[in-house]
Amino acid sequence: MSARIERVVTSGTFSLDGGTWDVDNNVWLVGDDNEVLVIDPAHDAGPIRDAVGDRRVTAIVCTHGHDDHIGAARDLAESTKAPVWLHPADRMLWDVVHPDAAPDADLADGQEFPVGDVTLTAVHTPGHSPGGVCLSAPDLGAVFSGDTLFAGGPGATGRSFSDFGTIIDSIRDRLLTLPPETVVHTGHGDTTTVGAERPHLQEWIGRGH
C-alpha cells in the first residue's frame, strides 16, 4: 500500500465565547506521492503547502468549524485549487472566520474521499460542535478524530454549541465501535488507540456529570 499518513503541527490561537488560548494543532495529510488529502488546515497555510509539495490536493476536509481548525482553509484552497469541505451544522462558526467565502462543499455522514489507494469515510460525531466529523480510514487502521476524542477522553464541551451527552453518544456509538487497534489521530496532542480509550468510557461519563 502506497498511501501514508503525515502530520504537520502549526501554532496559533483558538478563540470562542470571548476567550483566546494559544494552541498547537495537528494537520493531517493522507495520500501518496501523487495526491494528498488535507485534514484541518490550521493557522498557517505555509507549512502545509511545504508538506504537500508538488502533489495534487484532492480535498481539504475540516473536522469542525472552530477557528483554529479552519484558519488557513481559504488560503490553502486558493493556492491548491482544492475544495474545502465542512459539515453545514458548523457554518455559523465558519462564518465568523471567513464571512466572505463559503465552504465549497457540505460534509455529510458517509461521505467518501478516495485518495491514493485508500478511502476515507466521514463519520458525523456531534458534541464538541454540532457539525463535528471524524474521518475513518480502515485501510490504514486509522481514524482522524478532530476534537471529538483525544488521548485521555472527549473533547471539550463547556462552550457554545457543544454538549457533553452528545459527544459521549458520538464516541460510544461511532468511534469506540471501531477495531481496538485503530489509531486515533487527534486534532491536538498525541495519538492514541480505540482500545486504549474504550475502557474509560464510564469514567468520562462520571466525570462529566
Image (cartoon, rainbow, N blue to C red):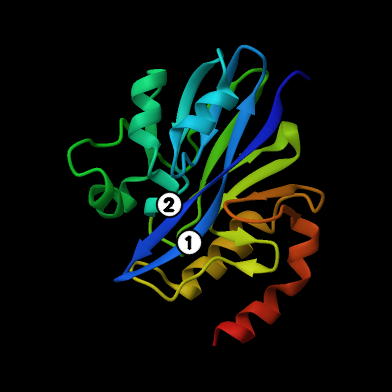
Can residue 187 be seen?
A: yes
Direction from residue 156 to residue 34 in the image, left or right: right
Looking at the image, which is closer to me, 199 or 29?
29
Q: According to the image, label 2 marks what residue?
A: 68
Quadrant that contains the N terminus: top right
Quadrant that contains the C terminus: bottom right
Can residue 106 be seen?
A: no
Q: According to the image, label 1 marks what residue?
A: 22
> Disc 1 vs disc 2: Cβ atoms closer than 8 Å?
no
Q: Residue 173's x, y, as percent? A: 60, 60
The local secondary structure at tag 1 comes to: strand
Direction from residue 129 to residue 149 in the image, left or right: right
Vertical order, 104 against 209 (above or below): above
Q: CA distance from mark 1 to mark 2?
A: 10 Å
Vertical order, 108 against 191 (above or below): above
The local secondary structure at tag 2 comes to: helix
Q: Write the residue at 33% across / 52% down.
A: 90
Mark drawn on residue 193: none
Q: Write the residue at 50% across / 69% down.
A: 156
Q: Write the residue at 64% across / 78% down.
A: 204
Q: Write the residue at 71% across / 23% down.
A: 3
- Kind of residue indicated by mark 1: Asp
Looking at the image, which is closer to me, 138 or 18?
18
How many residues crowd mark 2 within 10 Å: few (<14), some (14–19), many (20+)?
many
- Kind of residue indicated by mark 2: Asp
Q: Residue 118's x, y, as percent? A: 66, 24
Direction from residue 12 to residue 99 in the image, left or right: left
Direction from residue 145 to residue 104 in the image, left or right: left
Upstream in sequence: badge 1 or badge 2 = 1
How many numbered circles does the render carry?
Answer: 2
